[in-house]
């Protein structure tokens, strides 16, 4: 239902613009934001329980500023509204994207993952530019309903915004391809216990044709390979079919737990990446002394996992890969980081087994399409229980294994030269920075207008 994003905010904008006071509009904006977060994140209930309501109410408060901006600018200052209202929305997305505040899940721009022509904007300005375009189009449609005299011009503006992505898609050449790389994604399905899960991964991999890279999912190996040379030897033997990227989720000799992507070649381990951005409440509890009680009423993390030190690229034969783990697919900056390290393919290892009958697996797999479009790199995601998927360098889906499937899918990716960069790779979050400047200027102007004359 990605098409709905172009008009879904219109009722909320209309409701806030009709509020009797700015304060009432801010309250309406607050509850709008809380409702949005509850709807988008309802599937986290098993892990954080009543913490979800706290998250929705606290973070939903940021939309109070959005409601106030709408009330002040719509419909008295429609031209300003077309710029300021999307900018305030973008500032909210940026703030809640900070890793220490949880991360950028369910950004509005990610709703366009099925539409590579719209995702062309992501190559220019990241998911932030897609979000900005969506909110600007919603604002134009809402203004058209509120200002009948300017309806034609405003609807034309909304249409022009909607056509911006297809125009970029048509004018910007497809990313160049340096070589073709065969990648296999292994999905064992719902299997309980690290031993049977490992055995299933080995069995599926043994039946695969040779590939340049074979990707296992998050937590696919439940033992410390450094202390289990027998398992390491079996996996090394499988790597004779192609470089094998597994994911180790086990306690090490010092008693710490991390999640590590380990690349194995025909002679053993060739590289490692340790997950850097951990899932709040799922892999650690922020401010555990204050919120540790959540472990008694939900499946929140009983102990904190140890994060890694940053992104890295690993060499898999003739191509460099950027391994990232699960939740990290939500972060645009991590995709850019592995590209800066020379990655030609984004590789995500995931497990959403706790959330099988919810929106989570589909939401998660969709994010790889956005990261692919942003970076101009093909992206794959291997999930334990689905959804596993592969996308080309423009975000077009090449392969998919749903949550009802077990086995593997093999796909051929056309990878660009390591030096190739999209505008977003080169210039980063400049759209967000401009949104911050616009929002700050709007706040200063509003404060100046309220200041009594001397």
Image: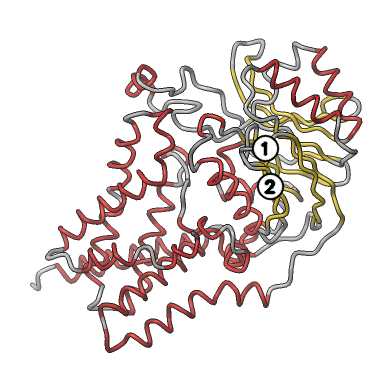
Q: Position of residue 133 (x, y in %)?
A: 47, 68
Is residue 400 toward the left or the right of residue 292 in the image?
Answer: right
Q: Which residue is under mark 1?
A: 405
Q: Residue at x 85, y 19 (%)?
A: 234
C-alpha gap between disc 1 and disc 2 = 10 Å
Q: Position of residue 304 (x, y in %)?
A: 50, 21
Q: Residue at x 19, y 60 (%)?
A: 25
Classed neighbour count for the residue bearing mark 1: other residues with Cα under 10 Å, few (<14), some (14–19), many (≥20): some
SS class, disc 1 = loop
- Residue nearer the viewer, 38 or 259: 38
Q: Nearer the viewer, mark 1 or mark 2?
A: 1
Q: Quadrant of residue 277?
A: top right
Is residue 275 toward the left or the right of residue 393 in the image?
Answer: left
Q: Quadrant of the C terminus?
A: bottom left
The label on residue 231 is none
Q: Which residue is under mark 2?
A: 400
| Vertical order, 418 against 98 (above or below) | below
Q: Residue at x 35, y 69 (%)?
A: 84
| Vertical order, 345 against 177 (above or below) | above
Q: Quadrant of residue 254?
A: top right
Q: Position of residue 400 (x, y in %)?
A: 68, 47
Classed neighbour count for the residue bearing mark 2: other residues with Cα under 10 Å, few (<14), some (14–19), many (≥20): many
């Amino acid at each position: 239902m990605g098409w709905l994003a172009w008009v879904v905010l219109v009722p909320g904008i209309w409701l806030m613009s009709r509020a009797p006071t700015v304060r009432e509009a801010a309250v309406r904006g607050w509850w709008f934001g809380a409702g949005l977060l509850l709807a988008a994140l309802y599937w986290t209930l098993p892990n954080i329980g009543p913490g979800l309501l706290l998250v929705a109410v606290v973070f939903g408060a940021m939309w109070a500023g959005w409601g106030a901006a709408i009330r002040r600018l719509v419909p008295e200052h429609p031209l300003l509204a077309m710029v300021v209202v999307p900018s305030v929305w973008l500032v909210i997305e940026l703030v809640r994207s900070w890793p220490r505040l949880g991360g950028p899940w369910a950004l509005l721009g990610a709703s366009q993952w099925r539409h590579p022509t719209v995702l062309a904007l992501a190559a220019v300005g990241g998911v932030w530019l897609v979000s900005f375009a969506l909110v600007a189009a919603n604002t134009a449609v809402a203004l058209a309903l509120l200002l009948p005299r300017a309806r034609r011009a405003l609807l034309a503006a909304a249409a022009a915004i909607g056509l911006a992505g297809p125009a970029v898609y048509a004018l910007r050449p497809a990313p160049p391809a340096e070589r073709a790389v065969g990648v296999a994604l292994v999905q064992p399905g719902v299997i309980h216990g690290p031993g049977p899960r490992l055995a299933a991964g080995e069995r599926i991999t043994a039946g695969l044709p040779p590939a340049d890279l074979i990707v296992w999912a998050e937590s696919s190996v439940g033992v410390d390979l450094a202390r289990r040379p027998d398992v390491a030897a079996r996996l090394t033997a499988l790597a004779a079919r192609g470089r094998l990227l597994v994911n180790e989720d086990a306690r090490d000799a010092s008693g710490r737990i991390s999640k590590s992507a380990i690349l194995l070649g025909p002679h053993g381990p060739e590289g490692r990446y340790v997950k850097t951005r951990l899932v709040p409440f799922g892999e650690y509890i922020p401010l555990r002394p204050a919120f540790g009680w959540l472990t008694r009423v939900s499946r929140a993390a009983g102990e904190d996992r140890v994060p890694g030190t940053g992104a890295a690229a690993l060499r898999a034969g003739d191509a460099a890969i950027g391994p990232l783990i699960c939740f990290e697919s939500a972060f645009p900056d991590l995709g850019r980081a592995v590209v800066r390290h020379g990655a030609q393919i984004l590789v995500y290892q995931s497990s959403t087994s706790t959330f099988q009958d919810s929106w989570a697996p589909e939401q998660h797999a969709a994010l790889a399409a956005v990261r692919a479009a942003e970076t101009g790199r093909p992206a794959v995601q291997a999930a334990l229980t689905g959804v596993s998927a592969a996308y080309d360098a423009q975000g077009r889906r090449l392969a998919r294994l749903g949550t009802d499937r077990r086995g593997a899918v093999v796909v051929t990716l056309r990878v660009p030269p390591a030096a190739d960069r999209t505008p977003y790779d080169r210039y980063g979050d400049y759209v967000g920075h401009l949104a911050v400047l616009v929002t700050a200027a709007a706040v200063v102007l509003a404060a100046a207008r309220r200041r009594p004359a001397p």
